[in-house]
Amino acid sequence: MIMRAKDGAWLGGAVLLALGAMGLPAADQPQWGQGWTRNMVSAEKGLPDSFSAAEGRNVLWRARLGTETHSTPVVAGGRIFIGTNNENPRNPKHKGDRGVLLCLEERTGAYLWQLVVPKITNSIFWDWPRAGICSTATVESNRVYIVSNRGEVMCLDAAGMANGNDGPFLDEARHSTPLGTEPGPLSPDDADILWLFDMVKECGVRQHDSAHASILLHGGHVYVNTSNGVDDSHKQIHAPDAPSLIALDQATGRLAATDTERIGPSIFHSTWSSPALARANGRDLILFCGGNGVVYAFEPLPPADGKAGTAGPAALRKVWWFDCDPAAPKENVHRFNSNRKESPSNIKSLPVFHGDRVYVTVGGDLWWGKNQAWLKCIDATKSGDITRSGEVWSYPLERHSMCTPAVADGLVFVGDSGRRLHCVDARTGAGLWTHDVKGEVWASPLLADGKVYFATRNGEVLVFAASREKRLLSEFNLGSPVSGTPVAANGVLYVTTMKELIAASAGSQVSP
């Protein structure tokens, strides 16, 4: 039996029954990466080597999104959360360009509710037209944590407004309505905001193009990068004293701590890399990559008590720091804007912790900097300035990488904006194989089921055996660029194009 849902999701009814009978492992994917180490490695089995959205082969369902989707889906508690834009409006009361976080039913892809956020109208360089919500959600229990296109850190009720407005935030109607427009009544498909922290208002952040973050939860705190960056001219930091990393109380949204590194003047473009968690030498570390090309390790805050408190924010204590490009310019950095041969480096990917090492991609900015770029491996067990002592190895990339590396079984997989995929020995940094593709690689690779899944801005999906020898299992094109990273959860592979979310499952068939 084949069914098509009226809200734009397609599904195969017989396949749903088959999935339950197969006894697939129940493993949600509630945040970006496996655990908080940010390594996109999954234990899921039986994932398809290929699928065809056009033919419906190995496709469980498809759900229409907006027209631009740069977020990665997360799967938790029977729901899927993904950021997009409002070019495919779900509710006629929300018209025009907006940031949107969609909540879909995991089983069918059916629409459940949405967070809708008006644009920042200062200039297009604050909140890029039709970019939508670019951040990836983090889910814990029945709470959803997200950074909106307006630089607001939000805690949402995973059930949306369907179970009432729980508060303490009660002004959802006004928040979802542009200034100068009278808000209408709330709907059951509206988001329920529990608390909100505005980084622009409270921390003086000047976000650039859009806020982009994947929130890290640890010890009752919310750790989030601020997206502080250059102004419209791309040659000046408007908010040099604004923090690059902050911590909030998870229960209340109160500002608990900030970094005090004054990274601002050295940010070459923006602060889009999200924090990760490491455990080295028996101690937890908050890993953070600044917009200045430096990787920092901070001590986590003591566990939060959930009380409001009156003291001001603490300073995050630095344990070690590693300058990924020590020979690059460090002062008056924006004079190198548009210089493809010499410039500072920055980091847009997430740091990945694996086996006492940190893996990160770094290099000249994709749009404004030099072409030189690397995959770096750092020893996480040291202290202090480890720029000289902490580098385990450095591997040259073709061009700047937006990709977060995936690490498993002694191998590192990564792609770059030079349109090349790489497999590298995790211990030595020796290159094992490369593969040229037609599009830039913004999406990070997924390692699952003995395979590595790559996707490109040309719409290509390439599936390789996760091995030291190059073995391409399949290659196909989805007809739309891919920015978000493929993920696997509960026996299903999810791939997001600009316009739709595809749930792929071996043996399923849905009408095209």
Image (cartoon, helix red, strand yellow):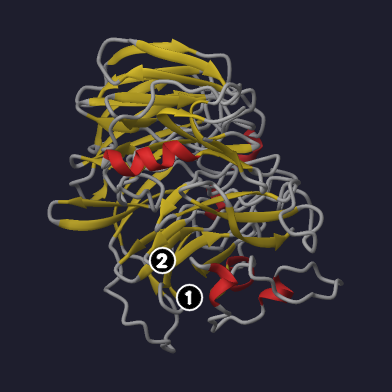
Asked whether 492 or 403 is in front, the reply is: 492
Vertical side of 113 occupied by 51: above or below = above
Mark 2 or mark 1, which is nearer the start of the sequence?
2
Vertical side of 150 occupied by 129: above or below = above
So how many labels did they put on this image?
Answer: 2
Circle on res. 467: none
- Residue at 20% x, 28% y is 409
Asked whether 472 or 345 is in front, the reply is: 472
The image quadrant where one finds the C terminus is top right
* Amino acid tagged 2: Val
- Residue at 49% x, 46% y is 73
* Amino acid tagged 1: Gly
Query: Residue 354, percent across and down?
Result: 23, 40
Q: Is residue 123 visible?
A: yes
Query: Residue 168, percent across and down?
Result: 54, 84
- Residue at 33% x, 30% y is 447
Left or right: where 106 falls relative to 450? right
Q: Is residue 196 visible?
A: no
Q: Which residue is mark 2?
A: 222
Q: CA distance from mark 1 to mark 2?
A: 8 Å
Residues at circles 1 and 2 in contact by the CB criterion of under 8 Å: yes
Residue at the extreme front: 1
Category of crowding for the residue at label 2, using alpha-carbon neighbours closer than 10 angstroms: few (below 14), some (14–19), many (at least 20): many
Q: SS at mark 2?
A: strand
Query: Residue 20, percent across and down?
Result: 33, 44
Q: Which residue is mark 1?
A: 253
Residue at the extreme left: 282
- Residue at 66% x, 48% y is 7
Asked whether 24 or 501 is in front, the reply is: 24
Vertical side of 367 occupied by 173: above or below = below
Query: Residue 40, percent across and down?
Result: 35, 38
